Amino acid sequence: MSKPKLTIIGLVVVLVASNAWWAYRLLDAGISQTYLGASLEDNKEALNQTLVLLPVVAQAGISRVKIISAARPAGDSVAPFEKDGFVWVGKIGLKFNNDGKLIEATRAWDPP
């Protein structure tokens, strides 16, 4: 084979490898962006739940049932459930003491 043909073949191989690398990086960036968007949406929902819950919790002598119902997002089809000492409502977990007083709140994707 002549030297120009080898040079052309080498350049084609380098070009194909470079394009494959750029395609991989683009796909990886797209996947990372999707996960970032989902994470931001989860944080937004948890923040909205918490902001709705704050005025309710600030009332003196509010019951556990009222706190849970206030924390439940509108249109949420999943019923609150208890696990690991928390009542999980939407994107947040609420922990109550024996008297029914709220003592802790956490995000659903970052449990204690």
Image (spheres, rainbow, N blue to C red):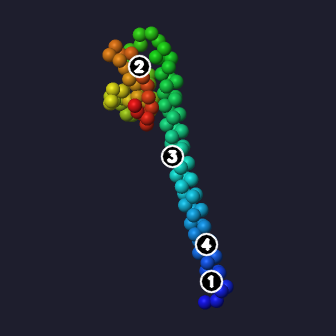
**Residue found at the far top of this picture:** 60
Q: Upstream in the sequence, badge 1 or badge 4?
A: 1
Image location (x, y in percent) of residue 32: 53, 49
Q: How many marks?
A: 4
Query: Label 3 belongs to which residue?
Result: 35
Q: Quadrant of residue 12?
A: bottom right
Quarter that holds the C terminus: top left
Give the secondary structure at mark 2. Answer: strand
As drawn, the label of residue 81 is: none
Please state which of the two labelled residues, at mark 3 or mark 4, is closer to the viewer. 4
Query: Residue placed at 51% from the left, 35% from the top?
Result: 43
3 vs 1, front mark: 1
Q: Is residue 102 visible?
A: yes
Which badge, 3 or 4, is on the more N-terminal residue? 4
Sequence-earlier tag: 2 or 1: 1
User: Looking at the image, do the residues carrying marks 2 and 3 touch, with CB atoms under 8 Å apart?
Assistant: no
Mark 3 element type: helix
Q: CA distance from mark 2 to mark 4?
A: 61 Å
**Residue holding disc 4:** 14
Q: Quadrant of residue 7?
A: bottom right
Residue sitting nearer the eye, 50 or 16: 16
Residue plotted at (38% across, 29% down) = 88
Residue named by callout 2: 103
Tell me where residue 97 appears, x and y as whole percent. Answer: 35, 18
Query: Mark 2 vs mark 3: which is more N-terminal?
Result: 3
28 vs 8: above or below? above
Q: Tag 4, which secondary structure?
A: helix
The residue wearing badge 1 is 6
User: Which amino acid lies under the numbered mark 4 shown in the image of this protein?
Assistant: Val
